[in-house]
Image: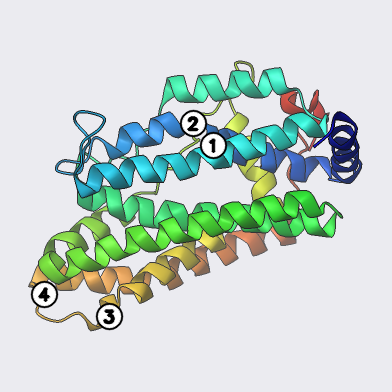
Amino acid sequence: MSKEECMEEVKELREMAAGLPDDVLVVLIGDMVTEEALPTYQTLLNTFEGCDDPTGTSDTAWARWSRGWTSEENRHGDLLNKYLYLGGRCDMRNIEVTIQHLITSGFNPEAQKDPYRGFLYTSFQERATKISHGNVGKLAREAGDKNLSKICAIIAGDEGRHEKAYQKFVTEILQRDADGIINVFGSMMRGQIVMPAELMTDGHDKDLYNNFSTVAQRLGVYTALDYADIIKHLVKTWDLEHIEGLSSEAEKERDYLCRLPERYRKLAERSMNKAKKAGDEPEPKSFRWIYDRQA
């Protein structure tokens, strides 16, 4: 590609990106920052007992998977970062500061070095990420940005493949230790699935993650209803309702898990309807990522 061709393509990219609403841009940046904290996630994988990569070049199946997964995930943050840089609408220095803070802060999904907890968490989180990227891509298409729409579709496709892999790991565990993993799943869902960017900050806004999440919820990019639907999908994928031979304790956990999606959905709908009736619109917040414009 010649210099002239390159500059023409950048010009075209910027023209399309100019039509992207600021609130969609904020959610895209938040998703990108989350992807760029990849070192934290590989560190997490290497804490799972029996699934680590002790030398960094170990030839075990788990070690090869961890490095392969990381190499694919690495492209997501790189691609979104370059899109935002070339688009010219963001304060890239502030975004990079946010990424550095997030990696420094880390995150704790309470996996407790347990591969059961780890694979349940990744089964949930990869699907959540797929949903988020897919919905941002739809909003980009509506705004006329076919480049971003394509980028998000590619990333969502990767996340979908990763989701299926982790869910197959759990399927295999169910065939060997159904009691064990169902009890762990029930225990995890009695808490809240920790989002990987919950400790996000730009060094100024201590509520940056909550503000970003509020915008995502309002746009329908990732909502409480999605949370409920993911639980429902996992329960169905692993066919928990029809697993036989469980202990009495695991039976209780299975029954709890099978009822949980509908319970979460009702709570989410009730909360959303209450806010709608009360006319509670989230107050716009300024984001340093976009030069203090509000979203």
Is residue 239 something one can see in this rendering? yes
> Which amino acid type is shown beneath numbered disc 4?
Leu
Whether residues under marks 4 and 3 lie with C-beta atoms below 8 angstroms apart, the answer is no
What is the spatial separation of the Cα atoms under label 1 and label 3, in whole angstroms? 34 Å
Precedes in sequence: disc 2 or disc 3: 2
Categorize mark 3 by other alpha carbons within 10 Å: few (<14), some (14-19), many (20+).
few
> Which amino acid type is shown beneath numbered disc 2?
Ala
From the image, tell me which residue sits under label 4.
246
Residue appearing at x 25%, y 74% in the figure: 255
Residue appearing at x 83%, y 29% in the figure: 88
From the image, tell me which residue sits under label 3.
241
Residue 94's disc is none
97 in relation to 197, above or below: above
Image quadrant containing the N terminus: top right
Q: Residue 120 is drawn in which quadrant?
A: bottom left
Residue 34's disc is 1
Whether residues under marks 4 and 2 lie with C-beta atoms below 8 angstroms apart, the answer is no
Q: Where is residue 177 in the image (x, y as percent from the top left)?
A: 11, 65
Categorize mark 1 by other alpha carbons within 10 Å: few (<14), some (14-19), many (20+).
many
Q: Where is residue 226 in the image (x, y as percent from the top left)?
A: 54, 61
Residue 37's disc is 2
Residue appearing at x 26%, y 62% in the figure: 170
Precedes in sequence: disc 1 or disc 3: 1
Categorize mark 2 by other alpha carbons within 10 Å: few (<14), some (14-19), many (20+).
many
Precedes in sequence: disc 4 or disc 2: 2
